[in-house]
Amino acid sequence: MLITRATEYALLSLEIIKNAKHPIGVEYIANELNIPKSFLAKILQNLAKNEILISRKGAKGGFIIAHPIDEITLFSIVVAAENKYPAVFDCAQYSETCPNGAIGTCPISPFIAKFQTKINSFLKEMTLGDIFEK
């Protein structure tokens, strides 16, 4: 589950929004990226709810980046876009959906927990600045 189209669209949208001098509307971004407007609107609203973007209403409304790009982590973007914590496996440490009903007794549980911790650390260290600055 780690990275889905929602996170991909969030990152592509943030690339457009970060360079803007004024709020950018959903319709403009959806057209630029050739992606569904309704799906993108939900993603951008989630980013706004999680204080990654600021949403401005009105005729000249749209979205702007809420913080400097070096302060916005990939972890926060994934959480906002996916509307849940990242999970490499369905039965990762954030999930209560162990397919075998063996939470706590699964022989690969320690590996899964270590792997998820490393992924989370990487996502928390990586910022938009790391992704977009050259």
Image (cartoon, grey):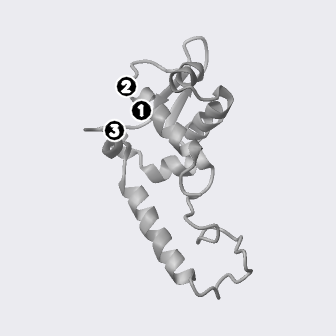
- The residue located at (44%, 64%) in the rendering is 119
- The residue located at (63%, 30%) in the rendering is 41
Which amino acid type is shown beneath numbered disc 3? Phe
Binning the other alpha carbons within 10 Å of mark 3 as few (below 14), some (14 to 19) or many (20 upward) gives: few
Percent across and percent down for residue 19 are 37, 25
Which amino acid type is shown beneath numbered disc 1? Glu
- The residue located at (64%, 29%) in the rendering is 36
Which label was assigned to residue 47? Answer: none
22 sits left or right of 133 in the view:
right
Where is mark 2, residue-wise? Answer: 19
Quadrant in the picture for residue 59: top right
Percent across and percent down for residue 85 are 58, 58
The vertical placement of 92 against 29, above or below, is: below
Of 60 and 98, which appears nearest the observer? 98
Of 9 and 47, which appears nearest the observer? 9
The vertical placement of 80 against 48, above or below, is: below
The vertical placement of 100 against 18, above or below, is: below
Where is mark 1, residue-wise? Answer: 15
The secondary element bearing badge 3 is classed as helix
- Disc 2 and disc 1: Cα gap in Å? 7 Å
Binning the other alpha carbons within 10 Å of mark 1 as few (below 14), some (14 to 19) or many (20 upward) gives: some
- Disc 3 and disc 2: Cα gap in Å? 11 Å
Residues at badges 2 and 1 in contact (C-beta under 8 Å)? yes
- Disc 1 and disc 3: Cα gap in Å? 7 Å
Q: State which tag comes first along the sequence, 1 or 3.
A: 1
Residues at badges 1 and 3 in contact (C-beta under 8 Å)? yes
Which amino acid type is shown beneath numbered disc 2? Asn
Q: Marks 3 and 2: which is nearer the front?
A: 3
Where is mark 3, residue-wise? Answer: 132
